[in-house]
Every structure is written in C-alpha cells, then in structure tokens.
Image: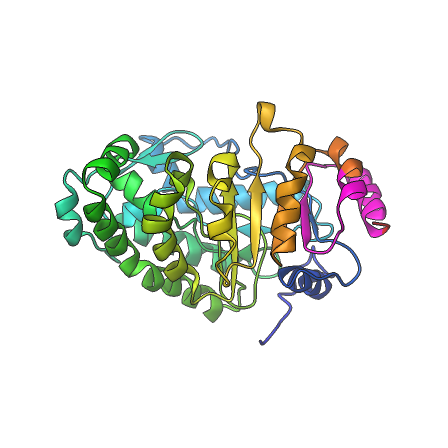
C-alpha cells in the first residue's frame, strides 16, 4: 500500500508513528506500544466565540467557526507519540440517520435524531440523499478544512453509524425493541435497507479526502493509508445474543468487508456479551474497549476480556487513567495494545513515554 508523509509542522515523526500503528494493526510491536495523549470523547468541548447565532443549529452549521475553533485549540496542545492533529466534521453521532431524512436536534455539545420512521413497512423508502442538508454540510466542513489544513492538521471523515444503531435512531430505541418482539422479520429487512447506501457514503467522503492526499481517519484519531472504519452496535447492549447473531451480525459483516482496517467500538459490558460473535469477524483488526464509569472501573477487572481479544489475534485500544498504567504494564504484554492517556503537560507525557519504552 502506498504511504506518504503529510508534512505536518507538529509531527516530524509522522512516518515513524504510522509504522507503529501499522504494526499495531497486525498485533505486533516495532519498539513500543502506540500512545495517544487524549482521553475518550475529548472532542466534546465548549467552543467559545463572540459570534451570535439565531439558534444552536446555526452555530453547528457555521463552517468557519467550527473549523477555526479547532485550529485555535491546536495552540495549547502537544503532539507527542501517536497523537495527531485531526479535524473531523461533526454534526453528532446520528448523522447517518440524518442523511436518510431524520431531523437532528442540537444542544451545545451533541445532537440526536428526531425519529421519523413511523412504520417499519415504510423502510423501503429510506435512502441516503446526497442533496440532503446534513450531507452537504459535512461536505462543506471537509472542503473548508482542506483549504486551510496544509502543514497544520489532518482532515478526517464524520462519525458514521449505519446498521441497527441507525435504525434505532430512525425508529426510536424503545419502539425498535418492541418491534424485535412483534415483527423481527421486518426489523431484519429494515436494517438491511439502511446499509444499502453505506459503502456509497463512505467512499464519497473517502474519495474527497484521498484526492487531497489525506489519510483515512475520524474521531478516534488512528489513521490508515487505506480505508479505516469504526464499526459499532451500541444497540446490542439491550438484546440477546440470538437476536444479535440473527439481525446485527450479518449487516456488520457486510459493513466491514471492503475496508482495509476496522476498529470495533466495544461500548461497555452490555455489548461485550456478544464478543464471541464479533471477534469471529476476520476483517475486524482491533477493538476499542470502552469500560464505562463507576463500578466498571478500574481497568484491571477487564484483564480477562483484554487477553481474550489479544488471544484471538485482535489488537485493542485502551483508555486508562494514569494511576492504572503500572498495574496494566505488570499484567499484560505490550504487543497489540494502543494506550490513550489523559496527560496534558509536556513533562508528564515525556515521562510516560520513557516508562512505556521500557515495557
């Protein structure tokens, strides 16, 4: 696969970092485990401006404000190890459902879809419309970012959730759960229809980015020279393994088959109940383990799950606290581990890297 250096001013070690990541995709190690000094979901942050907007949607749709706010945030950051400056266009996690006609409701930090599928029998009418206002806005955000990114930051694609998560956004989660009981065949038909346009959507944005010599990257900040996708199925936390295997697994297998790299977003112990099914998909290279909060911490209680994933030949992304690092190092090998650590200052980051180099 062709490889290239983006010439980022803040990443003179760009090529070496990608070598580490490509070794990690294969469950291997060239010198140390990859490290990103950014905690999960840090992209959800307040953007301050003296501008005024008519409503919150206008603020989210303000292209110059969104991209330039990201550029402003770069001034206070270090980019050590595998921490990259990545702008990715964000209208919220339900944007794929919005491409299919669901209106988005915005607040300061996120958005959600207003369910619009009143009857599962109407799912046959669902299509992604490239002239949809949300689709065009994502394009506009990408194009503006590309016009000013050279030497400064990478540009990625938006957060895409097709499959059962999209159907839940279109239908409403509680109603969809009832549908699984009342009419599972219609649910299966609907989720198949939803995924029909996924590859077209992915390839559309990937082509725009690759034509500007960008890598494939999105909110997780882990790039690929090929096609990198983050499949997920958060809805799976609420259903049985039988329903997961019958309704979610087939569309998930289809979703990942044309990608060069897939990192499954394993969101908590509810989804992890289906790990044996998900781990069997050969195209999934890695998992991002999101352990949750409260009693789901600390990370050490999940060592058996981490080892199970590694024993299956899959790599894993771990968001951990700094006080968990030493215990983790003492209990697991570094091959196939990608660490995300919430360390902000330069000194702490350099000291952490010295420790990880000895792992």
Q: What residue is rendered at 40% in x and 50% in y?
A: 160
> Height in image: 136 above or below 42?
below
Residue 133 x %, y %: 26, 49
Residue 179 x %, y %: 22, 37
Q: How is the image coloured?
A: rainbow
Residue 243 x %, y %: 34, 44
Side of 158 relative to 103 (left or right): right
Q: Could you say which is closer to the camera, residue 188 or residue 233? A: 188
Q: What residue is rendered at 35% in x and 42% in y?
A: 94
Indicate the quadrant where residue 313 lies: bottom right
Quarter holding the N terminus? bottom right
Q: What residue is rendered at 67% in x and 40% in y?
A: 303
Q: Could you say which is closer to the camera, residue 15 or residue 359? A: 359
Residue sitting at the far top: 294
Indicate the quadrant where residue 237 lies: top left
Q: Is residue 162 visible?
A: no
Side of 173 relative to 87 (left or right): left
- Residue 344 in the magenta stretch? The answer is yes
Side of 159 relative to 199 (left or right): right
Q: Which residues are magenta?
A: 328-357
Residue 173 x %, y %: 30, 34
> Height in image: 242 above or below 144?
above
């Amino acid at each position: 696969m062709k490889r290239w250096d983006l010439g980022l001013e803040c990443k003179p070690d760009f090529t070496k970092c990608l070598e580490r990541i490509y070794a990690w995709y294969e469950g291997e190690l060239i010198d140390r485990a990859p490290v990103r000094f950014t905690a999960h979901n840090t992209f959800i942050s307040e953007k301050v401006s003296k501008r005024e907007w008519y409503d919150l949607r206008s603020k989210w749709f303000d292209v110059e404000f969104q991209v330039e706010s990201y550029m402003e945030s770069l001034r206070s950051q270090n980019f050590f190890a595998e921490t990259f400056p990545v702008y990715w266009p964000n209208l919220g996690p339900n944007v794929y459902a919005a491409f299919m006609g669901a209106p988005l409701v915005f607040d300061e930090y996120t958005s959600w879809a207003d369910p619009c599928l009143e009857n599962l029998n109407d799912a046959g009418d669902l299509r992604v419309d490239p002239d949809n206002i949300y689709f065009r806005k994502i394009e506009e955000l990408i194009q503006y970012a590309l016009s000013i990114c050279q030497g400064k930051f990478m540009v990625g694609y938006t957060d895409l959730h097709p499959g059962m998560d999209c159907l839940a956004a279109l239908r409403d989660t509680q109603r969809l759960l009832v549908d699984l009981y009342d009419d599972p065949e219609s649910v299966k038909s609907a989720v198949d229809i939803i995924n029909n346009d996924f590859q077209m959507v992915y390839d559309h944005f990937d082509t725009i980015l690759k034509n500007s010599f960008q890598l494939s990257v999105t909110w997780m900040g882990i790039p690929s020279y090929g096609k990198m996708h983050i499949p997920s199925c958060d809805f799976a936390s609420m259903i049985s393994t039988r329903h997961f295997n019958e309704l979610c697994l087939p569309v998930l297998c289809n979703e990942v088959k044309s990608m060069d790299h897939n990192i499954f977003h394993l969101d908590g112990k509810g989804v992890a109940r289906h790990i044996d099914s998900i781990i069997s998909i050969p195209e999934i290279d890695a998992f991002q383990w999101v352990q949750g909060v409260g009693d789901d911490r600390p990370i050490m209680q999940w060592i058996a799950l981490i080892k199970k994933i590694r024993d299956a030949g899959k790599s894993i992304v771990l968001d951990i606290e700094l006080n968990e690092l030493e215990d983790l190092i003492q209990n697991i090998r570094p091959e196939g581990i990608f660490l995300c650590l919430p360390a902000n200052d330069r000194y702490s980051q350099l000291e952490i890297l010295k420790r990880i180099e000895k792992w």
